[in-house]
Image (tube, rainbow, N blue to C red):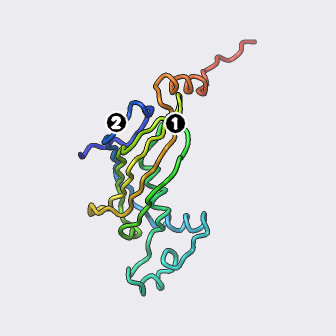
Amino acid sequence: MSTINNRIDMPCDELEIGQVFRTGGRTITEADVVNYCALTGNWIEIHSNKHYAEQTRFGKRLVQGSLTYSIMTGLIQFGPAIQANYGIDNLRYLKPVAIDDTIYVTAEVTAKKEKDEKYGVTTFLMKALNQDGYVVQRSEWSLLMLRRRADLEALLAASLPTEKQPERK
């Protein structure tokens, strides 16, 4: 499927097993890597030292795996039905990601279970593909979600402000 449909804005009960969401691409830049080093304190040589990285089996600096994962979760846009991150399982870094690589993400609904009357847990098989079509990272991401459309609409109605007219004096 080549359609970009990266917004998951429906409640758990409306998602179907096997449903796939797909993003456009995002090139990971030098600035991304340096900013992530500064933010996290992850100045490991393979990410931050060009001379060192050139001596390794990869021959160049690599993007942090956790940065790639963070970008993946931003490329798939989750709407307000998502209530919490429930867990990440089987996270694997399958191929290195280099600075200036472009990643694309697919998220396939692989499991759903009822948590209680109002909430469910949905599991997505998350894959990051590079510009050449290779899967560079995969994981199973479970999210706590509202189950029903009525609960989502009630939450939105209670949380979105309504415009007020200025008071006349």
Residue under circle 2? 16
The x, y position of residue 35, in whole percent, is 55, 64
The x, y position of residue 112, in whole percent, is 42, 39
Callout 2: SS: loop
Q: Residues within 10 Å of mark 1 (few under 14, many from 20)?
A: some
Q: Residue furthest bottom?
A: 55
Quadrant for the N terminus in the image: top left
Q: Residue furthest top?
A: 169
Q: Residue at x 36, y 67 (%)?
A: 94
**From the viewer's perspective, is residue 90 above or below residue 84?**
below
The x, y position of residue 46, in whole percent, is 48, 78
Return the residue nearer the eye: 38 or 86: 86
Callout 1: SS: loop
**From the viewer's perspective, is residue 93 above or below residue 112?**
below
Residue type at mark 1 is: Lys
Residue type at mark 2 is: Glu
Residue 115's disc number: 1
Return the residue nearer the eye: 139 or 10: 139
Marks 2/1 in contact by CB < 8 Å: the verdict is no
Q: Residue at x 60, y 21 (%)?
A: 162
Give me the C-alpha separation between circle 2 and circle 1: 17 Å
- Decide if residue 162 is on the left or right side of residue 132: right
Residue 70's disc number: none
**From the viewer's perspective, is residue 8 above or below residue 157?**
below
| Image quadrant assignment for residue 139 | bottom left
Q: Earlier in the sequence, mark 2 or mark 1?
A: 2
- Decide if residue 88 is on the left or right side of residue 102: right
| Image quadrant assignment for residue 169 | top right
Instruction: Count numbered badges in the picture.
Output: 2
